[in-house]
Image (cartoon, rainbow, N blue to C red):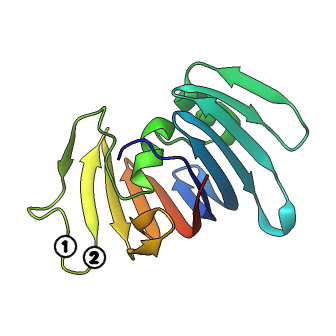
């Protein structure tokens, strides 16, 4: 089940060589289309990400919108960090993106402590704290690391959309 319409709410923390960022998020995924709202503490710094596949629009807190067919480049320019957004919809569910080569990070894909680890697109991804959710078993936390970048997603509330 690689395509699944879902809604996910939680928190994201990003650390790069240039600094750190954290926010709450509300993510709606409908096949390849996504809408992700990010906002900082006390509602500050609201940003909207809207896209389909690798095409992305970013609307900042002032209402200015940027569009690009290069989602990763636009995220870097607009947010100061990026992640493969097309793969992230799979990663938050503890799976690798089936359209791109991946490999288990350990001999056993599911570790005894409930971790699921794999490497994809130059990222090391760990899915932890698995639990039953509205979409079935899903991680409560996903950590993706690549070359000094670390993205942590705490997945709090899942629902089917």
* Residue 46 image point, x, y percent: 81, 51
> Which numbered disc covers residue 48?
none
Circles 1 and 2: CB distance less than 8 Å? Answer: yes
Q: Secondary structure at mark 1?
A: loop
The number of numbered badges drawn on the structure is 2
- Nearer-the-camera pick, 28 or 83: 28
- Nearer-the-camera pick, 129 or 120: 129
As drawn, the residue found furthest toward the top would be 69
* Residue 11 image point, x, y percent: 62, 65
Residue that appears at 36% across and 65% down: 127
As drawn, the residue found furthest toward the bottom would be 113
Q: Circle 2 is placed at which residue position?
A: 114
Name which quarter of the figure residue 66 lies in. top right
Q: As drawn, is 47 to the left or to the right of 69?
A: right
Separation of residues labelled 1 and 2 (CA atoms): 6 Å
> Which numbered disc covers residue 111?
1
Residue that appears at 31% across and 47% down: 96
Graded by Cα atoms within 10 Å as few (under 14), some (14 to 19) or many (20 or more), the crowding at tag 1 reads few
Q: Where is 145 relative to 30, above or below?
A: below
As drawn, the residue found furthest toward the right would be 62
* Residue 53 image point, x, y percent: 51, 28
Q: As drawn, is 14 to the left or to the right of 86?
A: right
Residue that appears at 42% across and 41% down: 87
Residue that appears at 18% across and 56% down: 105
């Amino acid at each position: 089940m690689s395509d699944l319409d879902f809604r996910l709410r939680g928190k994201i923390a990003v650390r790069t060589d240039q600094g750190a960022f954290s926010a709450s998020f509300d993510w709606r995924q409908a096949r390849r289309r996504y809408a992700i709202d990010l906002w900082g503490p006390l509602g500050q710094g609201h940003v909207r990400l809207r896209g389909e596949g690798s095409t992305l629009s970013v609307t900042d807190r002032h209402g200015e919108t940027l569009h690009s067919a290069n989602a990763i480049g636009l995220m870097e320019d607009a947010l100061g960090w990026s992640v493969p957004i097309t793969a992230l919809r799979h990663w938050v569910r503890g799976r690798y993106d089936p359209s791109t080569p991946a490999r288990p990070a350990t001999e056993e894909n599911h570790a005894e402590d409930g971790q699921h680890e794999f490497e994809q697109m130059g990222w090391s991804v760990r899915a932890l704290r698995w639990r039953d959710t509205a979409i079935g078993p899903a991680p409560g936390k996903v950590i993706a690391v690549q070359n000094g970048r670390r993205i942590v997603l705490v997945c709090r509330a899942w629902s089917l959309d």
